Amino acid sequence: MTLQKLESYTNKEIIKEEAEILTTILEDIAKNLVSPETLDKILELKKLSVSKDYLKLDQIVKELSNEEMTVISRYFAILPLLINISEDVDLAFEINHQNNVGQDYLGKLSSTIRQVAETENAQEILEHLNVVPVLTAHPTQVQRKTMLDLTTHIHSLLRQHRDVKAGLMNETKWYNNLRRNIEIMMQTDMIREKKLKVTNEITNVMEYYNSSFLQAVPNLMLEYKRLAKEQGIESMAGPQGQVLHIVACRMEEGKDTLIKDIEQELDISKSVASNLMKRMEKNGFIQLETSQRDKRAKYIRLTAQSQENMRKIRDFFDEMDRRLLEGISEQELLIFSQVLTKFYQNIESLENGGKDV
């Protein structure tokens, strides 16, 4: 069965309805900001664009004054932005809907883990799973934080539109809030006049951690572990991985590991440690061996498979270290460390108004 790719899904009816609302609001706001002649030019440019009469369109654009060019370019930059927000909201609703009704779609986490669980090496696949978020600091990304905040507010308001249609929210209040945010956006410069400083870049990035990574990453990890456990697969990440690492390190030092050692290392209670050992034994990670001297004490022994997995992990990181440091001398590493330290000191100095820290 071919699964649907939700990125290509659109509810054309609701998006068309919202596009009409957004366009009406934007045109009404433009009436109060520009002269009737300039508004006529905006409407004429829209018609020419739809009819693809590029020669006449080019002629009108060439005759625009700088003042007209500023407001008209802002209008035509904001209109597609608003429609894109509507499309994003619609996609989010469709994802929520299909998740709630148990519908499969391409890229759905639960469907993917279910498919993995059907393979013979499911455990190994999940152990080597690597999710890498990509953060881009593009030099052309000069959109002001004010604009980004307004985009977020409008996104939240459009998410409420279905509740408004269902009579669950006051339509007049919702409409006025939407108009207010679009009006502020229309009167806000979209890009900065001055070049961003390093401290501005850092502040901008940190502002979005709370609304993105600090929420998304823990939720993803919890859902991933829950779904894997439902399919009878437990990852070596988390407490089980920590136990394996502790036992493997102690083995290299010629030391045995008792359950009480794990209790101390992980700062967990005896009951929690006991349940953890039972799960790890069930998963085939460890074997428990009763001490000959004290029948109440139990040694933790890694199974052959766990020892092989730990060896592969160690070899992987050793190889990564070797490749990363290839051709770099100790003196160069020292200089690199000193330069990074100086960078951090300079950034802290900038944040403190140029004072040394």
Image: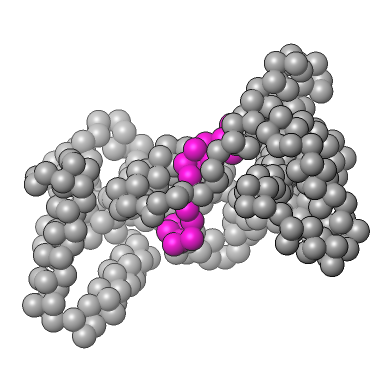
Q: Nearer the viewer, residue 352 or 115?
A: 352
The magenta-colored residue range is 131-153
Q: Magenta: predominant secondary structure element?
A: loop
The quarter in which the N terminus is drawn is bottom right
**Magenta segment includes 145:** yes
Answer with left or right where residue 172 lies relative to residue 235. right
Q: Looking at the image, can residue 312 be seen?
A: yes
The quarter in which the C terminus is drawn is top left
Q: Looking at the image, can residue 158 be seen?
A: no
Answer with left or right where residue 142 lies relative to residue 12. left
Q: Nearer the viewer, residue 183 or 333?
A: 183
Q: Position of residue 250 (x, y in %)?
A: 16, 58
Residue 348's place in the image compared with 248, above or below, is above
Query: What's the residue at 18%, 81% (across, down)?
Result: 328
Q: Nearer the viewer, residue 56 or 94?
A: 56
Q: Nearer the viewer, residue 329 or 304?
A: 329
Residue 96's place in the image compared with 282, above or below, is above
**Magenta segment includes 171:** no
Image-quadrant location for residue 136 = bottom left
Q: Position of residue 91 (x, y in %)?
A: 71, 44
Query: What's the residue at 78%, 51% (across, down)?
Result: 9
Image-quadrant location for residue 132 = bottom left
Q: Position of residue 299 (x, y in %)?
A: 21, 49
